[in-house]
Image (cartoon, helix red, strand yellow):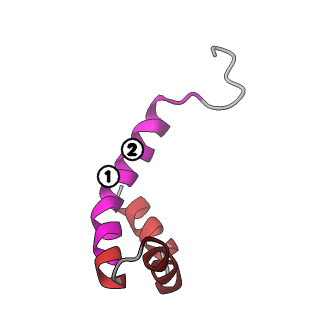
């Protein structure tokens, strides 16, 4: 799961942080901290969903 967390973090550029912080009216550093805190939860949810979602075209679904 560390690989997935790294991938998610790489997708969140400084420009993305600036856009989000401007949209919500919050300081960019606080926005970055909140996003960093949420990444493990997001990665866990994606991992859990991947474990329970059958592949597309699975004849048993």
12 or 58: nearer the eye? 12
- Identify the image quadrant of the C terminus: top right
Quickly name the residue at label 2: 45
| Left or right: 25, with 38 as reference point | right
Which quarter of the figure has residue 57? top right
Q: Badge 2, how many Cα within 10 Å: few under 14, some, many 20+?
A: few
Q: Are marks 1 and 2 in contact (CB under 8 Å)?
A: yes
| Left or right: 40, with 13 as reference point | left
x and y, in percent, of residue 11 in the image = 51, 72
User: In percent of the image, x 62 and y 31: which residue is there?
Assistant: 55
Disc 2 element: helix
x and y, in percent, of residue 16 in the image = 51, 78
User: In percent of the image, x 34 and y 77: which residue is there?
Assistant: 32
Q: Is residue 14 above or below residue 33?
A: below
User: In percent of the image, x 43 and y 71: which residue is there?
Assistant: 24
25 or 36: nearer the eye? 25
Spatial distance from mark 1 to mark 2, Cα to Cα? Answer: 6 Å
x and y, in percent, of residue 30 in the image = 28, 78
16 or 21: nearer the eye? 21
Q: What is the chief secondary structure element of the magenta stretch?
A: helix
Which quarter of the figure has residue 39? bottom left
Q: Is residue 38 magenta?
A: yes
Disc 1 element: helix
Magenta stretch in the rendered image: 32-54
Q: Is residue 56 above or below residue 59?
A: below
Quickly name the residue at label 1: 41
Q: Badge 1, how many Cα within 10 Å: few under 14, some, many 20+?
A: few
């Amino acid at each position: 799961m560390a690989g997935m967390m790294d991938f998610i973090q790489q997708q969140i550029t400084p420009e993305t942080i600036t856009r989000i912080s401007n949209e919500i009216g919050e300081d960019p550093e606080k926005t970055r901290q909140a996003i960093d805190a949420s990444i493990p939860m997001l990665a866990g949810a994606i991992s859990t969903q991947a474990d329970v979602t059958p592949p597309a075209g699975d004849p048993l679904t």
